[in-house]
Amino acid sequence: MSEHALETQAPDRASPLIIQVDMREQGSPVPALLAAYPDLTLRFGALPSGDYVLADEVAVERKTAADFVASILDRRLFGQAARLRALFPRAILLIEGDLTAVPHSIAQEAIRGALAFLVVREGVTVLQVSGVEESAALLRLMARHAQERMGQPVSLREPKPLVEELYAAYLVEGLPGVGPRRARQLLAHFGTPAAVMCASVEELARAPGIGRKSAERIWRATHLPASGQESARNTPG
């Protein structure tokens, strides 16, 4: 059967979500549940690793709780995880069901150890869901985040305050080593965020609560080029 015949097409929209599905998943109820979403397009094929590819860098291996335990016993789990992680920077293991309810001869400590190994040593994200319906819903949401939000810069700070009077403190608190208390001290000493940003190391060091090392960190943060490479003339003094 051709890939085109196996494709489930979403209704017309500007940018439909596309999930690549491994052929072996056709025996699972998850693809049919995904196909019910009008904003999804499923493309079946032989994937190099994993069961679902949500974006170029994001892939998901889906396992039932029973299959997860069985894959620990026959050792295939660790090879699958290593291959998935090697091919996709964002590797996700999705486990369906309750691991404690699976009849098996393996100790629970061994199961916890396998989970810890995957997360800490292999760098695989492990998610557990109750069943196939939750798997489908989560796959769709992860695909949306991967495809519609990937590449957007992540904010390093909390949202800016809604009260305009707090903007000055918000700006100064963005400096290294400066929390709410130090921000208030710096503003009380210099008067404005602009004066803080333009101050020399010596001027900063004279402010209450700011030592020489903190002053140098603040100066560097406000004087280094955006690339983070310090020019020869940008030396504190």
Image: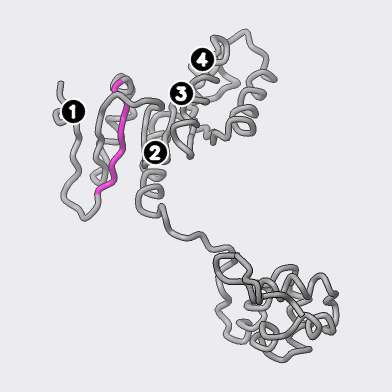
Identify the residue position indicated by label 1 in the image: 3
Instruction: Give yes or no for contact between labels 3 and 1 (Cβ–Cβ under 8 Å).
Output: no
Residue 31, x across and y down, in percent: 30, 30
Identify the residue position indicated by label 2 in the image: 139
Residue farthest bottom in this picture:
191
Q: Nearer the viewer, residue 67 or 232?
A: 232
Q: Is residue 66 left or right of residue 111?
A: left
Residue 179, x across and y down, in percent: 74, 71
User: Which span of residues is magenta-colored?
Assistant: 16-23
Report the disc number at residue 63: 3
Marks 3 and 4, the one that precedes in the sequence: 3
Instruction: Give yes or no for contact between labels 1 and 2 (Cβ–Cβ under 8 Å).
Output: no
Marks 3 and 1, the one that precedes in the sequence: 1
Report the disc number at residue 177: none
Q: Amino acid at mark 4?
A: Arg
Element type where label 2 sits in the image: helix
Q: Main secondary structure of the magenta part?
A: strand
The residues tagged by marks 1 and 4 sit, at their Cα atoms, a distance apart of: 28 Å
Q: Amino acid at mark 3?
A: Lys
Q: Is residue 3 left or right of residue 64?
A: left
Report the disc number at residue 76: 4
Who's the residue at 58% across and 63% down the image? 156
Q: Report which quarter residue 100 is drawn in.
A: top right
